[in-house]
Amino acid sequence: MSTQDSGRDDPRFRQIESIGEYLGSDLARTHGITKREQAAGLDPDQIQREHDQLMHDGYIILHGLVSADELQLLRDTSAPYLDKMGRNSFEGERTQRIYGVPEKLRAADRFIEHPHILAHLDRLLMPNYLLSQAQVVNILDGSPAQPLHIDDGFYPWPRPRPALSAATVFALDDFTDNNGATVAIPGSHAWGEERLPGDDDICVKAIMPAGSAILFLGNLWHGGGANYSAQSRLAITAQYCEPWVRTQENYFLSVSRETAANVSETLRSMLGYSIHPPFMGMVEGMHPKRKLDIHG
Ligand SMILES: O=C(O)CCC(=O)C(=O)O
């Protein structure tokens, strides 16, 4: 019989009985979801309490997530790339940003795939969520506050609605009262389209020591603060989105295949080498990892 006669004769052929099974199944047969909080030795009750607070306020601050050495390595390896100012008031006229972080800065992996952050993302987003963007952000002295914004407002689904993304800002320097600590409006993740931040809204500042992070929902109003401290404020921010929306940075272009083959399985998946069932992310009907030269 010719190989074109019937796929049913192939032992790998799967009979799909219903549209529900079709939509719910992982036809590319990706990996199961790991219980990351267990694997990382995190206390599920504590994560649940933090999750409840995150859903109530729209943000939480987590302390002591990374070591002094991990902070120093990221500061040192970032420094050569911090050579340009922002191109508009949103990027910040006195703010430096590094894009293409997963290609340039291996020291950032620890922050992007931090188990405590992933434990929360695993509760917030669907399996195989994606890294939407990651940036090192250096707010220089004299920088005005960044305009308040929400991170997932460009997806055309009117609010109030569930967050389609979540973000971290890790302090690489201590965040103080006057050096540009991230500001946020508690509870603003529940606002509708028509409500904009006003003078009466209470903003909190994420004042926290280096190595801490603010984790917030993509529909929370927030922004980088004003820096009038005579020192710069270094941070790394990562945004993660549902696996069925478009990411902001196109990592298939900014991350080489060689890098994608060599990062952790978790980061590779978040860079888009993953499948949202049944087919989103496939390449020629196959799992995208098949395009990488992965050994072992
Ligand atoms: O740097 C910060 O504190 C926040 C940055 C931010 O929200 C952004 O650039 O979108």
Image (cartoon, rainbow, N blue to C red):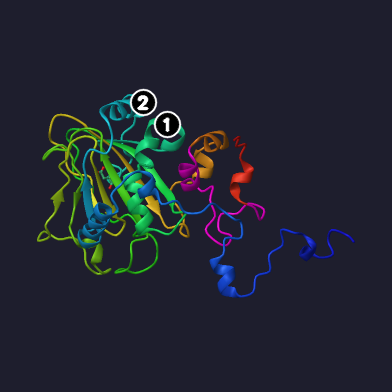
Judge the density around disc 1: few (<14), some (14-19), many (≥20) Cα neighbours within 10 Å. Answer: some
Left or right position of 56 against 202: right
Residue closest to the eye, 22 or 87:
22
Amino acid type, residue under disc 2 in the picture: Thr
Where does label 1 land, which residue? 106
**Residue drawn 20% across and 38% down?**
143
**Residue drawn 52% across and 58% down?**
276
**Is label 2 in a helix, a strand or a loop?**
helix
For the residues labelled 2 and 1, say whether their Cβ atoms are less than 8 Å apart: yes
Where does label 2 land, which residue? 77
**From the viewer's perspective, is residue 52 above or below residue 255?**
below
- Region in magenta: 264-286
Q: Quadrant of ligand 1?
A: top left
Precedes in sequence: disc 2 or disc 1: 2
Q: Is residue 144 magenta?
A: no
Amino acid type, residue under disc 1 in the picture: Arg
Residue 236, position in %: x, y?
31, 38
